[in-house]
Image (cartoon, coloured by chain):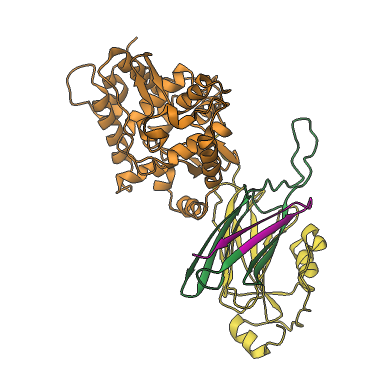
Amino acid sequence: MDRRSALKVLGLAGSAVTALVSLPKLAMASWAKTAFEARSGADALQNLYGGNATTPSDAVKLKAPDIAENGAVVPIEVETDMEADSIAILIEKNPSPLAGSFNLPAGTKGLVKTRVRMGETTNVTAVVKSGGKLYTTTKEVKVTIGGCGG
Amino acid sequence: MSSIRIKAKERAGVVDVKALMKHPMETGLRKNKDGNKIPPHFIQEVVAESNGAVVFSGFFNTSISKDPYLSFQYGGKKGDKLTLSWTDNQGQKDAETVDVG
Amino acid sequence: MTITTRQLLGGVVGLVAAATSFAGPEEDRKAFQSFYFDRFPQVTDHADFKNGVYSILPEARVQWEQIEEFPPYELAIEEGQALFEKPFANGKSLADCFPNGGIGIRQNYPYFDTARGEVVTLELAINECRTTNGEKPYPWKKGPLASVSSYMAYTSRDAMIDVKIPDDPRALAAYEDGKMHYFTKRGQLNFACSDCHMYGSGQNLRSETLSMSHGHTTGFPVYRAKWQEMGTLHRRLAGCHESVRAKAFKAQGPEYRNLEYFLAYMSSGLEINGPSARK
């Protein structure tokens, strides 16, 4: 999976890519405790993927509401046409920002839909691991303390 | 009754899977009426297999909503058997198999 | 004191056509629904009022539709079906208490039972069936009753509300009681249901958009994200009363049954779309 030509990667990213070393191929055999308990997105990615240098990319599509109807159930969709082997979702201000990580074997589309909990207005970042590099799209999702009681 | 509900439909060689898993997904941060923290209880790993191969897998953290929803797509055909299984942090497991429609 | 329809609706809706000071429920219903049609011209398909605020808030609607891809109430429908079909200790089951075996009948509730002289709601009927057959009644606001009611509502999906008010002074009195309740100010905040859900509908109360009463009853029982579980209509009514710091009435007591009778009748013509998922 790491054997992707740098050119191909650059072509997909479409934007300037800082000199990134290809991420080590980590076996995702079990729940990555250190990554999931990390207090920052950067630490989570470092522990999950062995590196946390990321590049913003339009090829990572993140569907999330501007204002969440309810912070307990926020629908999130991440999609990409890149050859992705992993997708992760980060919720910046949650106690443990790494909300989930998903592995996509060959033949599986770069698509994940799920529903997350958000404690407050914060940035949601979709991370796609492709060709040994991490690409991201970030969006702020507002969470209100609302809900007519009862 | 299984805790897993799966809808799996194939179109043009792509199987679209929508799954809903009944699970409290306790974060460990909530307190009960006596003021004691309710221990964390959440699905940690989900694996989807078809025709002997893993077609999707994922790891959840406590930020995934109660009764987790998961949707993904993989290459497959009608009649394939798709099995979805989960394991939680307390060692509980469940699995469900459906035919791709 | 009798509050006439004209006094209640006249100021905003325009006078009810009939010159009589007591117009019937049907005239009330037309005035009630016209109020919402005029207030929300963007809802071009009037059937969409069954979807509450999702008929007027595009971004909220997107999230609601995402949840509808696989809504949490599907679990309640399954549980409800299992409970519905499970026989009682005496061998009978819920199907024996209802017309058509309890399938596809939700739209007819509540109804006025002329023999008993009171309004009967679906939840009341479910529990009465249980107690008549020697079973314990379910709690009124959530849990198994909400699941069974969800299943029964589901079998009536797309059926139009068909609540009847027979030509019986007691039925009319129950309807009028519900109507008066709807328009009466209560609680420390001194709000009537109509203040928020009629004259304030579509407006924001802090970050919440006030829903329209036209369509209020169609989607129950509801999976409210706030509750993280199902709840019955009377659970919601009680919560709403507490929101204006009024003392809530007992679930399935005469007040809420009459209020439900009024609300359901007002939404006649809308389709049942319960159970539903809401914020």
Q: What color was chain A assigned in the picture?
A: yellow
- Residue C206 shows in the view: no
Looking at the rendering, which quadrant does residue B61 occupy? Answer: bottom right
User: Residue C51 is drawn in which quadrant?
Assistant: top left
| Residue B95 among those drawn in magenta | yes
User: Does residue A132 appear left or right of residue C166 in this picture?
Assistant: right
* Residue under the point 43% across and 43% down: C53
Report the magenta stretch's main SS: strand
What chain is the orange one? C
Percent from the top left, x then y, of residue C270? Answer: 33, 39
Question: Is residue C100 depicted above or below B100 in this figure?
Answer: above
Q: Position of residue A90 (x, y in %)?
A: 68, 61
Q: Which shade is chain B?
A: green
Magenta range: B83-101
Q: Position of residue C151 (x, y in %)?
A: 48, 39
Indicate whether B79 appears above or below B26: below
Q: What residue appears at the point 59 percent right and 45 percent down from the top-left corner? A: A144
Q: Quadrant of the C terminus of chain A?
A: top right
